[in-house]
Image (tube, helix red, strand yellow):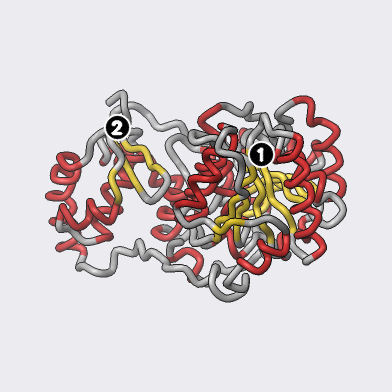
């Protein structure tokens, strides 16, 4: 998390005009959560950041105009959300969950529908196979119900199989559904009734703009939020190459506890969970096992993670500009289409953190850089 959250911007309700500016910046071309937060740490307002976008993109090597979300587009999205019965909350809204602010790339804006008071509850993620067995679904439902009895909300992705069972088991105690597309797109379609029940009794959340149709590439981003909302994540039935294991990886990167339910070695749906256990995940057979395995209280460990400072104050303006000029070529030479850790890039290039982050921001806004999970970056493939 960057210095934005340390500033006096702290928890506050945004005015309508400021919310429109945040929405415009968030929806402009090549802006992701990390670049949004970097820009907000460098400029006094989203309006100032919007004005600076073309300059940043040109410095990153972009020749064509950058698409910047208009006031009209932002107003249309807000109006559509309101008509749908949803609302938009910002990173500095008092309701925004503190635990989510401290992942590497928290969404600047979230669309929500339902009981926002669930944000104040400790939560545990439960995910697993879409083509789950009957026993797997029963277990997920039982764990969700048991966690509710211990006072936890349950977070999942409203997919078929394990996700659906987890939501059903926690419906009466507190369930949170994180969608891959816009908040108005129900996926899978057969979960329409489940969606409506969660929107009434629980909470539905989406990071993607209103109206966004979910695509395969959106699901990993959704998965990082499932793990990010919770103090731990439980995997019930997962193949070796599955979205559930991606969620487990995000959980580890975010410092969350990972739990796995063992299964038959003859069932491919259990190969992933068994592998997680071999790698150190906590084996669980009941909700009580999960609760006992959660080692750190919500209000201590998970909201005090290491922050990143993207300020430019470590060098004088003259020193910074000289370093920046040299760094652009060196960093481009060290980047490739294969993701690399930003920390490794900083060590290898021997430039300051602020200089490297500035060059990466320029490249991202120019459309030449892709950010990956685990604080990794790569050049965009088509370059």
Q: Residue at x 24, y 56 (%)?
A: 355
Secondary structure type for disc 1? strand
Q: Which residue is label 1 attached to?
A: 179
Residue 232 can be seen, yes or no: yes
Task: Tell me which numbered mark, 1 or 2, is placed earlier along the sequence.
Answer: 2
- Residue 256: x and y in percent read 54, 60
- Taking depth in this image into account, of 220 and 8 the one nearest to the observer is 220
- Residue 323 numbered mark, or none: none
Q: Residue at x 69, y 50 (%)?
A: 155
Image quadrant assignment for residue 51: top left
- Taking depth in this image into account, of 86 and 298 the one nearest to the observer is 298
Of marks 1 and 2, the one in the foreground: 1
Q: Residue at x 13, y 56 (%)?
A: 322
Characterize the local packing of mark 1: few (<14), some (14-19) or many (20 or more) Cα atoms within 10 angstroms: many
Image quadrant assignment for residue 82: top right
Secondary structure type for disc 2? loop
Q: CA distance from mark 1 to mark 2?
A: 33 Å
In this rendering, the answer to whether 313 lies above or below 20 is: below
Residue 365 appears left or right of 282: left
Q: Residue furthest bottom?
A: 300
- Taking depth in this image into account, of 78 and 87 the one nearest to the observer is 87
Residue 71 can be seen, yes or no: no
- Residue 4: x and y in percent read 47, 63
Residue 8 appears left or right of 253: right
Q: Which residue is label 2 attached to?
A: 62
Characterize the local packing of mark 2: few (<14), some (14-19) or many (20 or more) Cα atoms within 10 angstroms: some
Residue 217 appears left or right of 85: left
- Residue 274: x and y in percent read 53, 45
């Amino acid at each position: 998390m960057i210095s934005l959250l340390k500033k006096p911007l702290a928890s506050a309700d945004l005015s309508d005009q400021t919310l429109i500016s945040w929405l415009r910046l968030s929806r402009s071309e090549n802006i992701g959560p990390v670049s949004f937060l970097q820009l907000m740490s460098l400029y006094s307002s989203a309006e100032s950041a919007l004005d600076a976008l073309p300059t940043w993109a040109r410095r990153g090597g972009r020749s064509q105009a950058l698409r910047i979300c208009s006031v009209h587009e932002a107003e249309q999205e807000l109006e559509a959300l309101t008509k749908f019965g949803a609302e938009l909350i910002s990173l500095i809204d008092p309701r925004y969950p503190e635990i989510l602010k401290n992942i590497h790339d928290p969404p600047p804006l979230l669309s929500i529908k339902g009981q926002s008071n669930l944000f104040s509850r400790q939560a545990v993620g439960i995910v697993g196979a879409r083509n789950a067995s009957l026993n797997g679904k029963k277990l997920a439902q039982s764990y969700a119900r048991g966690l509710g009895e211990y006072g936890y909300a349950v977070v999942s992705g409203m997919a078929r199989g394990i996700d659906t069972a987890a939501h059903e088991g926690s419906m009466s105690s507190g369930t949170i559904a994180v969608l891959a597309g816009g908040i108005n797109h129900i996926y899978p379609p057969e979960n329409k009734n489940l969606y409506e029940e969660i929107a009434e009794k629980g909470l539905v959340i989406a990071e993607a703009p209103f109206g966004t149709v979910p695509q395969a590439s959106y699901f990993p981003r959704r998965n990082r939020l499932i793990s990010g909302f919770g103090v731990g994540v439980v995997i019930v039935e997962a193949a070796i190459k599955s979205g559930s294991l991606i969620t487990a990886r995000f959980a580890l990167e975010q410092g969350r506890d990972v739990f796995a339910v063992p299964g038959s070695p003859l069932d491919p749906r259990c190969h992933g969970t068994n592998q997680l256990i071999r790698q150190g995940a906590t084996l669980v057979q009941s909700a009580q096992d999960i609760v006992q395995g959660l080692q750190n209280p919500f209000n201590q460990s998970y909201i005090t993670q290491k922050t990143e400072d993207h300020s430019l104050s470590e060098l004088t303006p003259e020193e910074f500009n000289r370093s920046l000029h040299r760094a652009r070529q060196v960093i481009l030479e060290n980047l490739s289409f294969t993701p690399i850790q930003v920390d490794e890039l900083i060590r290898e290039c021997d430039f300051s953190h602020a200089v490297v982050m500035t060059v990466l921001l320029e490249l991202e806004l120019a459309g030449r850089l892709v950010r990956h999970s685990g604080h990794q970056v790569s050049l965009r493939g088509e370059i």
